[in-house]
Image (tube, rainbow, N blue to C red):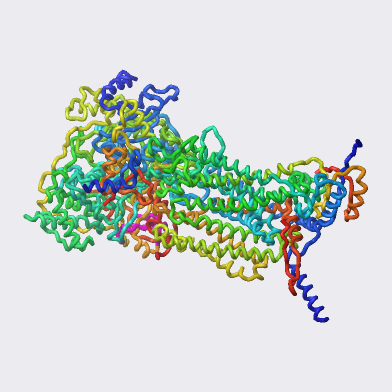
Amino acid sequence: MTTELKISEISANFAEGEQGKWGMAIDMDICTGCQACVAACAMENNVPFVGEADSGYGRSMHWIRTERFWEGEFPEIKMTPYQPVLCQQCGHAPCEPVCPAFATVHSQAEALNLQVYNRCVGTRYCANNCPYQVRSFNWRDYERPEPLPNQLNPDVTVRRRGVMEKCTFCIQRIHRAEDVAKSEGREVADGEFAPACAQACPADAIVFGRIDDPESAVSKMARGARGFHLLEELGTLPAVTYLKGG
Amino acid sequence: MASTATHHDHEQDHIAHLREKHLMLDPLPRGRMNEMVMESMHDTSWKFWVVFGILSVIVAVFLFGAWGYMIANGLGVAGVNRPSYWGIFLVNTVFWIGISHAGTFISAILRVFKAEFRRPFTRAAELMTTFGLVQAGFSIFMHMGRVWLSYWLMPIPNQRGLWPNFHSPLSWDLLAITTYLLSSTMYLFLPLIPDLAMARDRTPDGTWQKTFYRVLALGFRGTEGEWTHLRHAMNIFAFAIIPVMFSVHTIVSWDCAAATRPGWNSTIFGPYFVVGALHSGMGAVAMVLAVVQSRMKHMKYFIRGEHFDALGMLMLLVSMTWAYFFFNDYMVQWYGGDKWTQQLLHFHEAGPLGWMWFAMLIFNVAIPWATLWNKKWRSNPWLLFGVGLLINFGMWFERYIIIPISLTINRMPFTWRMYTPGVEIYLGIGTVAFFILLYMGASRLIPLIPVWEVQEGQMAHSLKKYGRETVVTISELE
Amino acid sequence: MTEHFSRRDFLKLASVGAATSAILTGCGPASRYVTREPYIQMPEYTYNGQSTHYATTCRECAAGCGLVVRTMQGRALKVEGNKNHPVNLGKTCVRGQATLHGLYNPDRVQEPAKQSKRGSRDYSNLDWDAAIGVVAEALKNTKPSEMAFLMGMAPDHLFDLVSDLAKAIGAPAPIRFGARGMFEARATLSKATEVLFGQAAMPFFDMSKADLTFSFGANFLETWISPVAFTRGFANMRRGGGHGRGTLVHFESRMSQTASKADMWIPIKPGTEGLVALAIGRIAAEARGGVMPAAFADVGVEAAAKASGVHAEKLDELGKLFASAGAALAIPGGAALGHSNGLETAEAVLALNALVGGLGRAGGMYLTPLAPMQAEYHRPANLKEMAAFVEKLKGGEVKTLFIHGVNPVFELPKSLGFENALKSVPTVISFATFPDETAVQADYVFPDHHSLESWGYQRVAAGSAQSALSGAQPTVSPYYNTRATADVFLAAAALAGGKAAEALSFKDEVEFIQSKIVALVGESDGFFSAPEINTFTAYFQQYGGWWKTVDELSTPSGDALGKAIQVAEAKFAGEGEFYFHPFVSPVLAEAGANKPWLQEVPDPTTTVMWSSWVEIHPETAHELGVDNDDIVLITSEAGAVEAVVYKYPAIRPDTIAMPFGQGHTAYGRYAEGRGANPADLFGEQVNGAGDLAFAGMRVKVEKTGKTYPLSRLESRMGVYGEALGEEH
Amino acid sequence: MTVTTNISLLAVFPDLEPAADAIDRLRTLGVPDDQMNVISGTPVTEAMLGRPRQWTNVPRLALGGALAGMIIGLFLAFATPSLYPIQVGRQGIISGPPTVVVVFEMTMLGLLLSTFLGVFLDSYFPSYRPMHYVPEISDGKFAVFFSCPQEDSEKITKAMTALGAEKVEAAEAQPL
């Protein structure tokens, strides 16, 4: 019974049948802050590196970052659990309506928050209006000296200057998995694929799957008593559920 | 008899005094006034060209050069970052739209309310509207990451089959600013037609100026019909442009207020921004008039202490209204107790740029209140210039506090970061220079004084004796 | 080219395995057989829009994680973990992910070259025939006793080849070294195991099933030994692999990334970890009742409390906690072993496992099984041996030095004088892929392929309960004109003739590797088995190695508690007022600085990118009159470095800490001239196992008046409240 | 039937009063209102001149423009999202408050634009053809144009001069 109560607590944010499609659960108790997700994401998604000066000036392009704070004073000091913050793929995304060019829109098919790079004109309103501050803007054309471009993932657009970008839940992997499943006449199985961050995570703290399937690993994890959403009070209906640490 | 004579002398003095004080009571023949206005355009000293040249260089290098550099290299050469995605670009946009509001206020609202002191400087103020909006447009385009694609924001049919997103306050901005720019330009142009015809008639044949005036005067002759159409149109404009003006700055305020950000999500931002716009706009009008009066020939006749006096009173009134809205916003945000808002308010006052917050209050409230209550002081052009300048700094600071400083604080403290302007400083200076340059250029080509409106006013004003007192009366001519 | 083993045969064989696993294909673009061609003549195994995945082994450290590299049209696009691999089960660490930035790094050594003068970086390119000639000459003309081979901790196949070569010609056995091994104190661990259990081995800590883990300085979530495997263990412990959510207690003078995940962080005084372990042992033994084991009999709890700065009550609590936990585990490692008493500390901590019956118990400690084809545990050289080697170089006893896979100029304590010692070596040949500091001091650089272009194998020394040999194959054709060092040695040996040619009579590297793994053909307890070597090789490449299906963990034997463990007071070299605590950068480790994306990945605890720093407690910084971003001069008895201050709230006020990994003077544009190298401060003090007592130092800290803005991901305002003004 | 040829004359007056008087006089002299026109440098109302009310289409055009603007606004707000429906932020494809803004702005733009163009239409702007004009009017003079039969011209000229006309002459079209 208690478990069910918790379920309703977590899903209270969502109206009936509105919990989105793909979701992620991140167990902050297990996340070791190792940054494998950060590097994996950058490699998968052609995220450019920006160099020392720009990265120290809030211009790093990370699509996922690990936050941590401090509590208390030495020697009783504690670090708050590492919290990987990425685009929460909000069901009710504040970034979407403010774009005058329809460059950030809600995908009907995947229930994801899409960023359409070639439609973006760079007003940066979406980033301003993102309560999670997970959008990164191409302040420059970032240099990738030859032969580094050999590594670029052909499934992912390389963004030019003046364009906003953000985590896509590795939509290219979602589509690949869906295509494969479709060609085999079946549904995508739970755990069949994962975004780069979840795939790399050595602790398996990041779990990805269908949140509209109550039997999926991610749904089960998200239903747990420790689950919460980031800035839940804003009603953005994030697709990412965090599990409290410690 | 002696006392009667004294009384008579006294009355004559009084009348002379009134005439000296009030342009409307001090009529000159129309031909003379035309001559004065034409001379004011043609009387150009070498100093003017020196300033004009310097400003042209600044515009070429700071505005277009730096902008080109930024387009080629990306916005990284500016200071914008996460979380201050909007920087001085939008500060300047709001600032220039604010400046532009004064012109409409003076030529539309004062016209509707028949405030006679407006007559000689409606055009000077309207020019500010148009030129200010040009700068605002520049600033907003500079801000865009891919400005070369800015036409994607226009609601025009295109091969992508995609229209702009009308859910976005930025789309509303585009519509509102376009509407405002077009209508204020039209509103500038309509009353200008008779003056252009006047200039046409007084420009020798064979000069390029003649062609310029000929073309722009559209063949205006001053027939009854033309005047009737013009009058009706100006009446419609005077009323209709007021809601447009309010909508523009309200929508600009919604860029902030519609966002889910602490400190921004405020219902009072609309009127607060409109009043703020008038505040800086009035200050700018005072500055422009002080310069025009002192630097342009014959302008001391047209622009007098009474005008600065009236402007000063308006500035004081607007300052009080601004303070009221500011406090209203502050009080509610402060009382609300949201932790991020609290942090933001604290950051405004005690953060590294806390001085700006205090300077804003001093420039926008303390100084106007301390000086403008005094009729004599506020009639002094240069004092009003100074106060206007400070108000403009104060209002610029206000926008700086609302945009980059408030953007520093959000709900993810891990990302808080100060904003340090880069090339946008130069671009901002470039827009100021371009504004002045346009204004200077216009002052050589466009009769800054709407002579026919002044004459119309002078026709309507007369002196009447009520008992022993000679007073001014105004007859309704329209 | 193909009478021996053609690619087509290879493919046929591979397709057998393809039925079992769809995504892993067996063969690589087999660098030796395939030349780079324009894509209009695309190799038949590549398809437009289709990825090809190759299993190989990560060489960013010696842990031997299995990788699957996604390639498309001959380009390596993404590194993913090999799900079948027993070390990492499909996962990778941050460095593994960034391997591609090493492969496609613009600053790789692109051709064999001769340097006109050491350090001049004035190279004249050679062709490979000339290069092989140089190696052959060196093999032929140097007296075997005056030859030296200095090898890195990976790859093992090359080490085996060089060992065979050295043995055949009578040269000294190759020396293996790596900074990571030095900071991990591998020698100390195996020595302590030997002392307590009579068998030198790598302990296996079964954290997955533990209920309580006491970690004494072991940075197992960062870079220590096999971080991916340990992270999995930690995660499983937290998930309740034992009897519920497991607890981690970490003893270290600074809050490392590992400590930050601990439920309890004990900021212990440096060098007192052993004392504390003993005290905990004594309290735990008392709590468990029965006879007090000799190991803990002489321990004074009060004295330990006094020395370590941990309150006696706290020790009592910890001891009882350890005694009462269902499955308690104690792990020694990292800086705890980098003290003069490090060996005894390791013994004391390992003895705790024995005390609670943790030897050979789920959630306790085992000994890691030896890799297939391995007779005994082999550890890399400790510092004592390296110091002796450097002395040998200085004495002019080495005429030709071959260096592969290690960067001693950067990694060894500067005071050891390796760079100087090279001056006494007439010929230095480096096989570096990257122009690192050591390669810059060599006469010749004959670049090896990048690991993703290489064949090979790596013995899994830790992290796997199964005996495992991880296989490597080229995932892409070599991008530059590089050549496998194994092939260079084989060709040179053939050219040199004599014993060398006899011992290394292999056609190429692959044949050599097959000659080694042929021993596994017919083994039936493996992940796969094959009746003959070609099939076996195909499977070996397809699956990324060979490992047994069953755990082969052995229970440590011997009476570990039988004799008293004495932990002497740690000796600190130098006079300064601060303990110096170096640690391996959790992101860059010793060799990641050349990869731009690794530089841009923020350090987990400080979020610093692109630089190094010195962690100073805020109060200490205040006393020193320094603030964030101020540059301080740190002086030890052996050297001095300048470093940028990071006011770190979770470090003992008497300790300063500095990451190892930056401070390169060569190594490519992304590494060079960034931050400082704490190895410049290291002396030569070693512990009982000969490992460097890198934490056994006291240093002076002086303000320089210079500043340098550290690039941080975190907001100093939001995290530390800087520049937000006074609180209301 | 005698054929009367009309000629165009113009009388320039220094002020409003004599001009108004002249118009009255002309009317008594048989020149109908639709054969008269007054040009001036300042706007004077028909009432001041004692002339019939001027017809203007500007307000009607303005209303029409406003309506057109509103229709465009409605099209932008309601039709364009349906042409290419895109979901943003859980707002409807067409949602209320934003449409108000769009419709308002477009209505105002239509209103003001058509007002402006209305002036052009009603006044036949721009027209650079030669027209009857005297530049003095921009100095505050009032000029009365009128057509009268050739034979009356002398009589009328006299009358005008008597009323204070500075000059009365045949109106000639001059380039503007």
Q: Is residue D94 left or right of residue A196?
A: right
Nearest the viewer among C44 and B36 is B36
Nearest the viewer among B243 and C50 is B243
The residue shown at (43%, 36%) is A148
For the image, the number of numbered tags is 0
Question: Can see residue B141?
Answer: no
**Residue D102, percent across and down?**
54, 45
The question of residue C637 being in magenta is answered with yes
**Residue C574, percent across and down?**
30, 59
**Residue C485, percent across and down?**
34, 32
The residue shown at (26%, 55%) is C252
Q: Is residue C400 left or right of residue B386?
A: left
Nearest the viewer among C700 and A9 is A9
Range drawn in magenta: C626-653
The question of residue A135 being in magenta is answered with no
Nearest the viewer among C680 and B340 is B340
Corner quadrant of residue C405: top left
Q: Quadrant of the C terminus of chain C?
A: bottom left
**Is C5 placed above or below B21 here?**
above
Q: Residue furthest top?
A: C3
**Residue C548, percent across and down?**
19, 32
Q: Quadrant of the N terminus of chain C?
A: top left
Q: Residue furthest bottom?
A: B2
Q: Residue furthest left?
A: C290
Question: Can see residue C232?
Answer: yes
